[in-house]
Amino acid sequence: MKVLSAAFAGLLVLLGLISFNVSAADAKPQTIAALYAGKATLGGKTVVAQGKVVKVNNGIMNRNWIHIKDGSGDAKAKTNELLVTSLQTAEVGDQITVTGTLGIDKDFGAGYAYSMLIEDAKIDVKK
């Protein structure tokens, strides 16, 4: 029994040293609330989120600006909506999955500053 326990413990240590490379396409979408909660460690990394499109502004600064909500987060704390920039677009009411780089504390000037957004996103519209 001790040999089996030692082998199992060794396996756990070995697995902890292996880096599993999961592609963004295989990644499970995170809620908007979870992205806000983890933004300090997720900034600059590829993330996946999904939600309903609530606002779209196309063609501004050579990109499309899409706002999504997924029912998570806090409206008062402004953590219930996520801004996504992309060369692709969607329509208000669409249910979409986005994959892109999580940007933190982005200031585009003219009063357009965001504590968090997904940039250069690939958008998958659910039909």
Image (cartoon, rainbow, N blue to C red):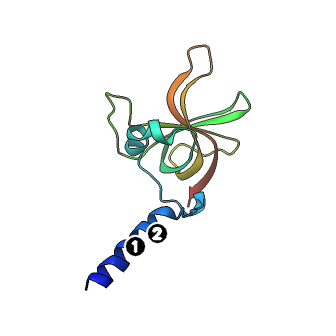
Which residue is labeled 1 in the image? 10
Position of residue 113 measured from the top left corner of the image (x, y, whole percent):
54, 21
Rendered position, 72 above or below 55: below
Mark 1 crowdedness (10 Å alpha carbons): few <14, some 14-19, many ≥20: few
Q: Are marks 1 and 2 in contact (CB under 8 Å)?
A: yes
Picture quarter with the N terminus: bottom left
Q: Residue furthest bottom?
A: 1
Decide if residue 116 is on the left or right side of residue 65: left
- Secondary structure of residue under mark 1: helix
Q: Residue at x 39, y 70 (%)?
A: 12
Which circle marks residue 71 in the picture?
none
x and y percent of residue 66 in the render?
Answer: 57, 38
Q: Name the residue under label 2.
A: 14
Residue that appears at 46% across and 69% down: 14
Residue at the right extreme of this rendering: 62
Q: Residues within 10 Å of mark 2 (few under 14, many from 20)?
A: few
Residue at 35% x, 72% y: name it.
9
**Which residue corresponds to the image point at 41% horizontal and 38% vertical from the top-left?**
36
Amino acid bearing label 1: Gly
The image quadrant that residue 63 belongs to is top right
Amino acid marked by disc 2: Leu
52 or 4: nearer the eye? Answer: 4
Q: In this view, does 85 lie above or below 12?
A: above
Find residue 35 and report its horizontal and vertical position in percent.
Answer: 43, 43
| Position above or below: 109 against 51 | above
Tell me the element at label 2.
helix
